[in-house]
Amino acid sequence: MVRISPVEKLKADGGDAPDSPAQQENVDKNLPQRKKQAWNKGEPGAESMAVEVLPNSPDLDRLIRQRGRDLRLRQVERQRAVKLVNTLITNLQKFLKDNEEQPFFRDISVLTTGSYYELVKINKPNEFDIMLKLKTPRLVWTELKDYNGLFYTVSLIRRTRSEIRSFLLEDELTISSTKIMKEIHFLVRKFITTHQESAGEGRWVVCKRRLNSPAVTLAFVMENEREEILSVDIVPALEVPQGWPQAARAGPDVDKWLGKNARRKFLSQPVYFVPKRPKQRNLSDVEKESWRISFSHIEKEIMRFHGNKKTCCEGRANECCRKLCLRLLKCLFEGLKQTYEGKLLSLCSYHGKTVFFHHLSVRCEDSLWTPGQLSDCFMKLLGDFENAAQLGTLPHFFVPNFNLFSPAVFPKRTRLFLVKELRKQRESGLPLLQVRRPPPVLFYTPALRPQIEEISAEAVTPLNRDTMMLQTSSFTYPYVTLACIIVVMAIGCALHVLV
């Protein structure tokens, strides 16, 4: 199979190479059509875009299966972590509802999201995502230019005297994301000063705010150690029940996979806006107060009902390997980021989840995802991700006009480095998936070879010579004594035999 470069592929499709801002703008306009060609089975251009997936060797098949088993979470660790998080969230809800300083946060509800609740968390249950749904009056949103439907300003339809007025800008309509974040951060810090766990278990601390993060992060640490056991991201979100924005109104492409009824069900649910601004520098005042649209609740539901048939994963006879493939891809991402620390900062698990959704919308039949096909399914998924990185095209699954590999959000140099390392991994048998086990403890330690140091005659004084002779005599004396005892005992035994 012939592999072509991203530039050649764009020229073959009648587009220009994204070497200039104007050319990149043309590429972004063609994203929906290119997405359809890339992810729909049998469409023209799909074969030329696909990375060639060769049959897996027995060693690679064994490695993937073993690594998949190792990624499962231990039941004991899960129970302890969930108990800590549930206690924290219950007490936080009670604190906010009893709070008199800021009544706007009294009427909140909790939505659990993220990889743990989607059952795709790997290694340890040490990260949890909690969304605090804030009820608001009827809202209207305005899409920000140049962000292709991912970022918005959110405003009230009419002025109000309700509690939300403390978080409005000067126009008394636009909801300020920075004010919401500042207040929720203040309230969580105040709550932590009153919240205590059982003696000896540990304590919760508020982590330093991360730039452009929509979350207040809490870390659980042991009393006598500074080791972080787990963390919880608390994200405030505006719930908007009156339909989806235009950029996402078509709904996710799940008709052949989950069915048209599932897509209509998704579209009937509300969407959420979280206080996250774009990552670009020199943002305008409007962009600094923007909100990002979130589909975390839809993603969680897709992960829960992920099969082409309703019976998928209802019993051992109907198990599939879809989620296990995503766990393996996340494990590979972690290995790459740890190995090349600082070089793949733009890469995150959401890139893997997005390509996973696109892949499932093409390979939708349950018969293609049986546990016995784990290694083949994973290598096909990895090939799709490598191909998307090579082309620089990964459309957001819910907002297809937004490209997650656009140079504005994923630098070209980082993307090309990622492509090179993915190819190395695939061609060398995925060494980053191999478990680095600690060396076994040895009960017998072999003696070290003696280090002989030459001493010159001039360096040995008469006193030193006497000392060395004394040390040598004291060292050889026990051996001479032991030899004499053995000789005496041998003579005694011989005389005894003769008598």
Image (tube, grey):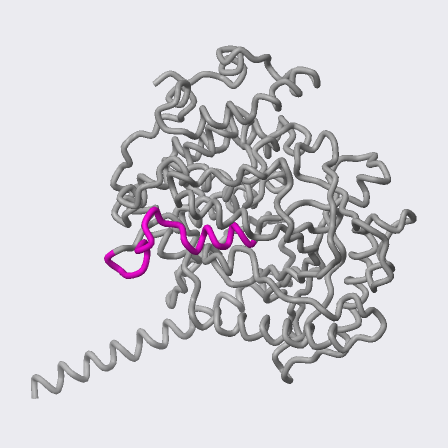
Residue lying farthest to the left in this orientation? 498
Q: Quadrant of residue 312?
A: bottom left
40 on left or right of 291: left
- Tell me the quarter of the image containing the C terminus: bottom left
- The mark total stands at 0
Vertical placement of 195 versus 236: above or below? below
Of residues 141 and 378, the one nearer the viewer is 141
Question: In the image, what residue occupies the spot 34% across and 30% down?
Answer: 53
Residue 226 screen position, x and y as percent: 67, 67
Vertical placement of 180 versus 61: above or below? below
Magenta segment includes 8: no
Question: In the image, what residue occupies the spot 81% across and 70% down?
Answer: 103
- Tell me the quarter of the image containing the N terminus: top left
> What range of the chain is rendered magenta?
297-317
Of residues 422 and 390, the one nearer the viewer is 390
Residue 83 screen position, x and y as percent: 55, 75
Question: In the image, what residue occupies the spot 64% across and 50% down?
Answer: 242
Of residues 194 and 262, the one nearer the viewer is 262
Vertical placement of 152 versus 413: above or below? below
Residue lying farthest to the right in this orientation? 170
Magenta segment includes 302: yes
